[in-house]
Every structure is written in C-alpha cells, then in structure tokens.
Image: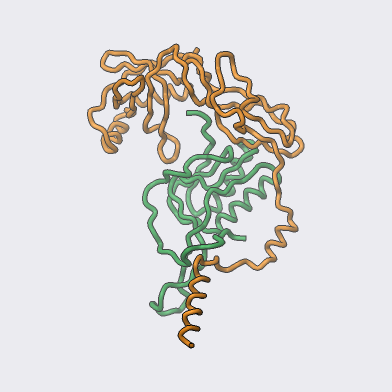
Chain colours: A orange, B green
Amino acid sequence: MEDTLKLKAEKRENSGTKVSQRLRSQGKLPIVLYGHKQQTFPLAVDMHDFVEGVHHGHRLMELEVDGKNETTMIKDIQYDYLGRDIIHADMIRVNITERVTVSVALDLKGEPKGAQEGGILEEHADGLEVECRVSDIPETIEVSVDDMEIGDALYARDVKLPEGIDLASDEDTLIVICRTVEVEEPEEAEALEGEEEPSAPEVIGREKEDQEDEGEQEKGGE
Amino acid sequence: MALMPKRVKFRKSQRGRMKGNATRNNFVAFGEYGLQVLESTWITARQIEAGRVAATHFLHREGKVYLRVFPDKPVSSKPLETRMGKGKGEPEFWVAPVKPGTVIVEIGGVTEDTAKQALVRVAHKMPVRCRFVKRRHSL
C-alpha cells in the first residue's frame, strides 16, 4: 500500500502568470484541487515537500486546507520548458477505496535474446492505463523482456498485472518491439552521394502559373 | 546529402524572430535519450547532417538515431561585391529555427553511457549549448 504524504495547503486569492511566478519565487507551488463534483480551489503548497514527495513516488497526498483534510491524487504535473522543474500540479479528490484509472510507468527488465544477434529494443509506450483501487496504485509495472528475439513484439495484453489491477488501455497497444537496425549500405550511400542533388525545391503552383502565362501570351499573339 | 524540403510554397522567406521558449518538441518522445538545446538559434542542414553522421558513426550498427528537427527555412544572401538593391538574394542554405528546450536528436536501443557519448559528439557539431536528457516514464 502506498503511503500518503501530508501537506499543508493554503488558498490562493489571485491567479495568473505573474502571481504564480511570485509564488514560485517564494518557494511555493501553485496547484489546483478539483473532483467529486465539489468546488474547485486554486491552492499553493510548499515546493520542496511536494517535489520530494513526487520524487519518492508518492501519488496520494493528504492536503490540509483551512483545517479540513482532503485525500487527493496527482492527476497531472506541468514542467518548465526544459522539463526540469515542476511549475504546476493538478490534484483530484479521491476516496481511498475508490477505483480509478491511472497511467503507470513500465519498467523493462532484463536484456532481450535478440540483442545478442544485433537487435535493438524499440519502446513504443512509456506506460499503461490501469484500473485499480486508489490504495493499490503501483509505482511501476515490471515487464521482463529476456525472452524476446528479433521480430518479437510485446503488447499490452501480454503484460502480467498484479492482483486487483485491470488493464484499461487497448489490449493491442504495442509496448516494445525487438528488431534489427536498418543500416544504410556504404555502396548505396556512395551512389546517393554520386547523384546530382537538386539545388532548389519545386515551387508549388509555379508550373501552373507558367502554363497560364504561356497560354495568355499565345492568345495575345493570335 | 543535406536535408531540404522537396516542395515549397514560397522560394524565399523573411528572417522572423525566435522569441520565448519551446512549448512543443521539448521532451524525449521516440528514443530513450535526447539532446536538448539551451539557446535559440538557426541550425543549418549541414550541422544537422554532421551531427547525424557523428552519432551513427559512433554507434556503428547499434541503436537508432531520430532527428527531431528539419531545415525548412531558406536563408538567402547576396553575391559578393554586389551593390545594394536589385531585390532579395537567392536562397543559399536551409535552416531549422530552434528555441530553448527543443529536443533536436534522440537515440534509442543503446545503453545510457553509449547514448551520452554519441550525443556529446552531436552537441559538438551544434552552434549552441546543449544538454543530455532522458525520457520521463512517469509523472
């Protein structure tokens, strides 16, 4: 069972870019709380505590707002343009016994057999949508890729999920494929280099215009 | 062979501006590791090609290299010793305008150490500072 992180949150009176930037400079993180058909609140929590909680894999958080405790789950996180710092988070109200649909990261374990024959593992999906109780949300889902040979593919339906957790994603979702790398043969590359490069791209509509101009000139000549 | 569009709507373009940071193409989406630029610049088709060659040469036959930028902007210039006027110059080369945060190259199917070494070689071919980034698997 996942631990619940307890955080103190204060209501935000004003909203907007400048106000949020000021909050962040004070070491606070703007968040929004919604769900269960109740009122939406813009809140602020301590940046350090929240970020540390996220890095330790906490999804569930108990927010204390005006002396009232709310059990919440992280719905979404926004990062800055470099993907380094958290700038905003969406929190959704949940009951601890409620079943929810969440995205859980996949953890690929082992080295595929095909890798020894020159194959590579191409990941097509980061995570899977699963339906489970709030208290049973796994941090990651482990998937073994040891038995994969070149040409083998692993689909969502092949992943063994822990008890009490159901797959919510499409069963045919491709997760990972083991295949060889298509390498450009040196001869082909040389042949390509030998070909004359087009110096300029074709201009769309230019031929039509030229033909029309020629047509008009011919008419004029008659 | 340097990258260039096959067909264009207009032969020449104005210079434009590169304000702000990247709000799209700013995370690793295809491979496992990527190279993110930290400044805004024009990356020429030659620089992209040089980076690609450096990475593929280092990786031998392992892994896959994904190019996330395409030079679709023509840059024109006037010939030397020409008087001003007489219209805009002819297109000379092609560039991809990038903003801080844009992931320009990605690598998949290799270990982190190998990817890092390959991407350092790509970074050396680029006209701006870059950083190594990994794919984010969870929140």
Q: Residue at x 52, y 58 (%)?
A: B44
The residue positioned farthest toward the left in the image shown: A13
The residue positioned farthest toward the right in the image shown: A117
Q: Position of residue A169 (x, y in %)?
A: 55, 27
Q: Residue at x 67, y 50 (%)?
A: B57
Relative to residue A15, is residue A131 depicted above or below?
above
Q: Position of residue B37 (x, y in %)?
A: 48, 47
The residue positioned farthest toward the bottom in the image shown: A222
Q: Quadrant of residue A167?
A: top right
- Judging depth in this view, the residue of A114 and A41 nearest the camera is A41
- Judging depth in this view, the residue of A206 and A66 nearest the camera is A206
Relative to residue A115, is residue B104 depicted above or below?
below
- Judging depth in this view, the residue of A94 and A192 nearest the camera is A94
Q: Position of residue A118 (x, y in %)?
A: 74, 39
Q: Quadrant of residue A115?
A: top right
Relative to residue A89, is residue A137 depicted above or below?
above
Task: Classify residue A157 as left or right of residue A87.
Answer: right
Task: Classify residue A14 as left or right of residue A113.
Answer: left
Task: Classify residue A174 as left or right of residue A84.
Answer: right
Q: How many marks overall?
A: 0
Q: Residue at x 29, y 22 (%)?
A: A39
Q: Quadrant of residue B15?
A: bottom left
Q: Position of residue A135 (x, y in %)?
A: 47, 14
- Judging depth in this view, the residue of A188 and B100 nearest the camera is A188
